[in-house]
Image: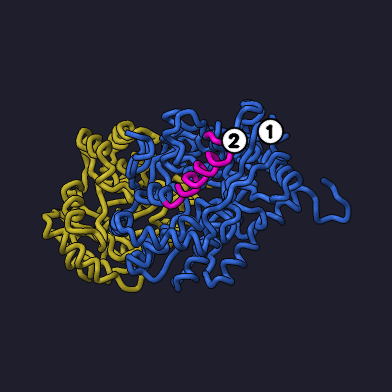
Amino acid sequence: MALRDQTGPYFGDFGGRFVPESLVAALDELGEAYDLAKLDPAFGAELAELGRSYTGRPSIITEVPRFAAHAGGARVILKREDLNHTGSHKINNVLGQALLTKRIGKQRVIAETGAGQHGVATATAAALFGLDCTIYMGEVDTERQALNVARMRLLGAEVIAVKAGSRTLKDAINEAMRDWVTNVETTNYIFGTVAGPHPFPEMVRDFQVIIGEEARQQVLDLTGALPTAVAACVGGGSNAIGIFHAFLDDAEVGLYGFEAGGEGAETPRHAATITKGRPGVLHGARSYLLQDEDGQTIESHSISAGLDYPGVGPEHSWLASLGRAQYRPVTDAAAMDALRLLTRTEGIIPAIESSHALAGAIELGRELGPEATILVNLSGRGDKDMDTAARWFGLYGDEEQA
Amino acid sequence: MRVVGPVIRRRNEEAAGALIGYLPVGFPDLDTSIDAAVALVENGVDVLELGLPYSDPVMDGPVIQAATQQALANGFRLADGFEAVRRITERVDAPVLVMTYWNPVVQYGVDRFADDLAAAGGAGLITPDLIPDEASEWIAASERTGLDRVFLAAPTSTDARIRQAVERSRGFVYAVSTMGITGARADVDAAARRVVGRLQAAGASASCVGVGISTAAQVAEVLEYAEGAIVGSALVHALAEGGVEGAGALAAELARGTRGE
């Protein structure tokens, strides 16, 4: 079987549905609605039209030679998901799930968010479709992504700062699941990444594979060949699976996921789940997980709120176990250097999340050499990260300290 | 082995039904949690449900979350759970079920967990985030060791899933009384009565209702149609506010509900 044909609930030993019984009916309802929608040309047409006239699809590719000069001379091509409406790839998935919500006939949506990109995308879709919307966000993340909190509230969403646990993305997911358990009859959970219980890993992936399908053809048109390597950042892994998927059965194309190495994968402060974790169960799926000996989840760390997650989608764990994709850590410092480098050489300010993929591309280019072509998923733009970047580089003072 | 089925049957013969009390291990500390569990039994709780603190408890409301987070912050380890079961079963005769999220069991090793729980005198497991569909390893381990396994049934469960919960559970089926997470509520949902009715129609020998029960009147109301009533957050709150004595006093009050008082 082609790797692209793999569906849930299991990806090898990974995936499944480890959830309270109360949620099973809702997951079944969602899965059945999705299976029907897949077969309905009208659903595909409506989603494609939204992509075209609302998101701005297809997103362009941009070759970045001045940046590539720092990457061993390899050709570097960016897939510009940062140019989507709302500023990241998250909108692709949200529009699909919002259409499904309408089909199921529910009037309220909830979502978790880390960096705020998925929350903004969900609040946007809720405004577009006239749905009630509640977003759960870790309190730490509401502080470091205050701009996105304001955006969500302006869009009409209620934003709830989650004070439990590490007060980041994993706790926002716990709280959203509690809401869903309580309000499942009226509420649909628009999950933001390719983790969680079946059908989310498969469904969110399917809504994101358009990234790689477009990019594969765009790179062929530009260069006459497939890329040597595809690079993406991996938190839960939705932008990475989105760009990898079209290439899964192109064995000559290397697939590289870059996890948040935080202060260093050898320190306790990182979010390098596949690099340093081991299989376990979190948020409804069996997958790689940062955990202690007793199976308690370890708090992750990353300068990037969107990658600050101790789990990862089960399909990535499967691709790692097959050796089809490689996963490597990128430190906070390397990501921030890459953010500044792309900004200074190409005039494109990337999200800190995506900057991990850029740092990875620099490393890959130096390994693969000037003959290589590296396709990088620029999954989001950096506007939301200006406060973090200004503090990191010392841009707020009277003197330039960077 | 001290399993729960016979106790629930006996309490339904001699009283209105069984009272099941929940407390987390290690809150406020290991010794006090053990003393409090013993106090529950001495004051009329028939079956103990001991919760193992977990970092990501998606079924738990704020009261239990706060208690289990404190236990984790104090350094709770899985070994403390087995120690608590052993020390409690040495002191009282009530069967002790362990309520645990699934990942700690997976990491400990499902067979090893079952063996160590049985050796400590435990009755079995309640698994809030493990549905029978994913439980083949645990079903095999519990068959081998004779431990009870309690799966959940919800108002939204289909008839096929209700039947599955009945067929796969041993001891009792945990009927979620209302859609939602743990925590005391003013009214126990009418949905509880319907879930129990469906479980009985599917052949359940015992259904116990949990989530939202905090008073003797609610216990008595639930025991009109179910074989057991499960109280959690209210007891944790009583322990937090009034110590072992407070938890025991609430248990004594709740037990009045089993006698129709």
Q: Does B240 appear above or below A378?
A: below
Looking at marks 2 and 1 on the same chain, the residue that comes earlier in the sequence is marked by: 1
What is the display colour for chain A?
A: blue
Q: Residue A253: in sight, yes or no?
A: yes
Give yes or no for contact between labels 2 and 1 (Cβ–Cβ under 8 Å).
yes
Q: Residue furthest right?
A: A399
Q: Residue at x 48, y 70 (%)?
A: A128
Q: Residue B34: in sight, yes or no?
A: no
Q: Is residue A298 left or right of residue B226?
A: right
- Image coordinates for residue B77, horizontal then vertical, percent: 46, 39
Front one among A138 and B182: A138
Front one among B61 and A287: A287
- The chain coloured yellow in the image: B
Mark 2: which amino acid?
Answer: Ile
Q: Does B11 appear above or below B71?
A: below
> Judging from the image, what secondary structure is the residue with disc 1 in?
loop
Q: Is residue A201 left or right of residue A344?
A: left
Q: Residue at x 45, y 47 (%)?
A: A209
- Image coordinates for residue A175, horizontal then vertical, percent: 46, 58
Q: How many marks overall? A: 2
Q: Chain of mark 2?
A: A
Badge 2: how crowded within 10 Å, few (<14), some, or many (20+)?
many
Q: Give yes or no for residue A180 being in the magenta stretch.
A: no
Q: Where does the magenta region start and end?
A: A207-225
Mark 1: which amino acid?
Answer: Ala
Label 2, on which residue? A374
> Judging from the image, what secondary structure is the residue with disc 2 in?
strand
The majority secondary structure of the magenta stretch comes to helix
Label 1, on which residue? A71
Q: Is residue A202 left or right of residue A224?
A: left
